[in-house]
């Protein structure tokens, strides 16, 4: 039986070695260097924390993936399953208003159950940034610009899909929280016929259809403008509730375009936020050849209030282990082509020679 | 630059034949020659994979195939979330609770004992109705369950009811309509949505004009 257990690997854990681990470290360093150069400073979060602190903030369906344990005092703990949440608590403990805005970055492992079928999701390691204490357009734009530079650094074939939880909230304002939750889920699954069905008792049918059409939209800024015009004629009430947020998204895209970073961005109104704490823009980055989004982010202005500091926040997190196999121009992160082996019997002589060669930036083994 | 073909999984069996016939009527021509399981269509726009019905959601979930044709029963059992962008007019059936004829089965016992291939669906269906249920997993010939006394009830797909009747069973209750969907991996859709939307429009139009009577 002991031998049988040796072959088992618990779900949600992985080990990786040698060149793969080398590349991972180099990619982590490159990301951290980029984030640091934008003024984002590193933070480390604890590996486990009290489950009760996060209980209400963990999205439905995610709680069963969290590894829980009981400490010697009988408190229920959870392992770090998502860095954003753990980070929010730490920031709530250490930040005060005079520290804002705070720019932080992280690279760390996450521990959560993955079904054996979903093991290829590779959700083991997150790197990311958070901009705390900067609300609205300036903050959103800073984070999206840094996202663009991150994708550029990794040289991955990716598309950014930008949506808005604020838009969702303004259109479905009249609905109860539980109805909104249901509509949000259906929006993420593009089940628009069901959305019309749920909405019809609250909205007139033409408004329900207009709302469903709105949240099915994916396209360019030009197509968004066309959609906006159509919406105005089809449903004035949905148009009126949506127009401010649609204009906001349009302004974000135009600003990114001016910076030369809008090429791979699509406005995708079905991206309305998968996390309960989202409040403003939300975005996901999809990469060719990957089965799920590889980078997720957005604005969550109320999350930190749960932890004692009322500061707006926006950020993103990338599933680094998932991205690593698809990184372009990999040479930057791989072991040097030439590894010099010292010959000769005298190890001290070899050591002295090797030290000289190493100073030239080369790798030498004794 | 030539676009990469869309990756499409088809389930072995009748659904594949019907789908192939529909696609052919739309000018998408392909065949799985010499027991091959991969085929590219005449235009090079699609690469088709022939997979076992119950494995199809796994291939689409992992993005190995971007999309596929799949019944809602199989989707449900897989537990995965997909975009269901079209419901096909063919392949529909019903999920039913059945039991021995004249056994005075009400289907209302305190704890139903049910043999089925569809354990997830059955458990969830009765739990949603606040009814405890004991589910016995079978992989085929489910009708034998009540006949041999393994369980008084079965939950299974019923099309004509001929197999039930041949085994002295009857439908006690229809539990759900089962439809066949075009399923798409969400991430795959996001990166190929323009081509996929166009394909969905083509399918809708193709199905409107399709005459499946020529099916063998």
Image (cartoon, rainbow, N blue to C red):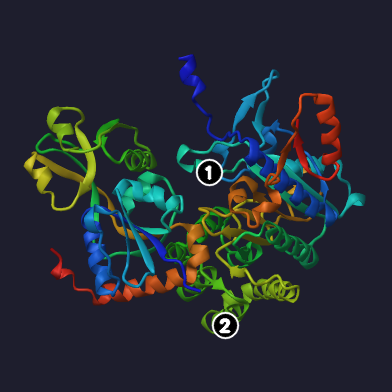
User: Where B163 falls versus B177 (above or below)?
Assistant: above
Residue A224 in the figure: left or right of residue B159: right
Instruction: Residue B17 in the image: state x and y as whole percent.
Output: 22, 60
Query: Mark 1 — on which chain does it sit?
Result: A
Asked if one can make out residue A308 in the rendered structure from this viewpoint, the answer is no
Q: Quadrant of residue A58?
A: top right
Q: Residues within 10 Å of mark 1 (few under 14, many from 20)?
A: few
User: Where A55 falls versus A286 (above or below)?
Assistant: above
* Residue under the point 83% across and 40% down: A357
Residue A102 in the figure: left or right of residue B123: right
Query: Badges 2 and 1: C-beta atoms under 8 Å apart?
Result: no
* Residue under the point 58% across and 62% down: A271
Q: Quadrant of residue B45?
A: bottom left
For label 2, the SS is: helix
Residue A97 in the figure: left or right of residue B165: right
Q: Residues within 10 Å of mark 2 (few under 14, many from 20)?
A: few
Looking at the image, the residue that sits furthest to the front is A344
CA distance for labels 2 and 1: 37 Å
Query: Mark 2 — on which chain does it sit?
Result: A
Label drawn at residue A226? 2
Nearest to the observer: residue A275 or residue A130? A130
Label drawn at residue A189? none
For label 1, the SS is: loop
Instruction: Residue A239 in the image: state x and y as whole percent.
Output: 59, 77
Quadrant into which the C terminus of chain B falls:
bottom left
Asked if one can make out residue B163 in the rendered structure from this viewpoint, the answer is yes
Circle 1 sits on which residue?
A61
* Residue under the point 55% across and 37% down: A65
Instruction: Residue B41 in the image: state x and y as whole percent.
Output: 32, 67
């Amino acid at each position: 039986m002991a031998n049988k257990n040796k072959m088992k690997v618990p779900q949600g854990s992985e080990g990786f070695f040698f060149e793969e681990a080398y590349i991972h470290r180099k990619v982590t360093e490159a990301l951290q260097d980029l984030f640091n150069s934008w003024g984002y400073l590193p933070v480390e979060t604890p590996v486990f924390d009290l489950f009760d602190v996060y209980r209400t903030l963990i999205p439905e369906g995610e709680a069963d993936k969290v590894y829980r344990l009981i400490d010697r005092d009988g408190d229920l703990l959870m392992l770090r399953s998502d860095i954003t949440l753990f980070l929010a608590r730490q920031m709530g403990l250490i930040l005060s208003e005079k520290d804002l805005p705070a720019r932080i970055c992280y690279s760390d492992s996450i521990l959560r159950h993955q079904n054996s079928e979903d093991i290829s999701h590779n959700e083991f390691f997150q790197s990311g940034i958070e901009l705390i204490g900067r609300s609205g357009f300036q903050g959103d734009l800073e984070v999206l610009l840094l996202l663009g530079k991150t994708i550029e650094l990794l040289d991955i074939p990716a598309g950014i899909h930008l949506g808005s939880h604020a838009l969702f909230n303004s259109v479905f304002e009249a609905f109860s929280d539980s109805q909104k939750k249901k509509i949000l889920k259906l929006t993420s699954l593009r089940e628009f016929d069901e959305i019309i069905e749920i909405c019809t008792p609250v909205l007139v049918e033409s408004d329900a259809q207009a709302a469903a059409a709105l949240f099915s939209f994916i396209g360019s800024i030009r197509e968004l403008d066309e959609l906006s015009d159509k919406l105005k004629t089809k449903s004035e009430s949905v148009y009126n509730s949506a127009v401010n947020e649609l204009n906001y998204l349009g302004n974000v895209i135009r600003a990114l375009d001016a910076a030369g970073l809008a090429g791979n961005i699509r406005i995708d109104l079905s991206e309305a936020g998968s996390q309960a704490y989202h409040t403003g823009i939300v975005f996901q980055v999809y990469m060719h050849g990957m089965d799920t989004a590889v980078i997720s982010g957005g604005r969550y202005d109320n999350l930190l209030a749960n932890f004692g500091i009322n500061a707006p926040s926006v950020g993103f997190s990338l599933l680094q282990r998932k991205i690593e196999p698809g990184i372009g121009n990999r040479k930057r992160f791989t072991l040097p082509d030439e590894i010099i082996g010292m010959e000769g019997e005298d190890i001290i002589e070899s050591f002295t020679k090797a030290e000289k060669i190493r100073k030239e930036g080369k790798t030498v083994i004794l | 630059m030539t676009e990469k073909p869309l990756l499409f999984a088809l389930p072995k069996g009748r659904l594949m034949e019907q789908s192939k016939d529909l696609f052919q009527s739309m000018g998408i021509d392909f065949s799985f020659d010499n027991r091959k399981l991969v085929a590219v269509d005449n235009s090079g726009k699609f690469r088709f994979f022939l997979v076992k019905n119950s494995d199809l959601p796994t291939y689409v979930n992992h993005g190995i195939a971007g999309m596929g044709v799949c019944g809602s029963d199989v989707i449900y059992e897989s537990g995965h979330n997909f975009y269901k962008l079209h419901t096909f007019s063919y392949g529909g059936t019903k999920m039913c609770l059945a039991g021995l004829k004249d056994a005075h089965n009400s289907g209302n016992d305190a704890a139903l004992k049910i043999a089925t291939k569809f354990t997830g669906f059955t458990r969830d269906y009765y739990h949603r109705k606040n009814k405890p249920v004991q589910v016995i997993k079978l992989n085929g010939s489910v009708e034998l369950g009540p006949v041999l006394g393994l369980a008084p009830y079965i939950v299974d797909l019923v099309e004509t009811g001929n197999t039930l009747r041949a085994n002295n069973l009857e439908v006690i209750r229809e539990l759900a309509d089962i439809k066949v969907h075009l399923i798409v991996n969400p991430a795959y859709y996001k990166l190929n949505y323009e081509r996929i939307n166009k394909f969905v429009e083509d399918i809708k139009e193709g199905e409107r004009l399709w005459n499946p009577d020529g099916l063998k």
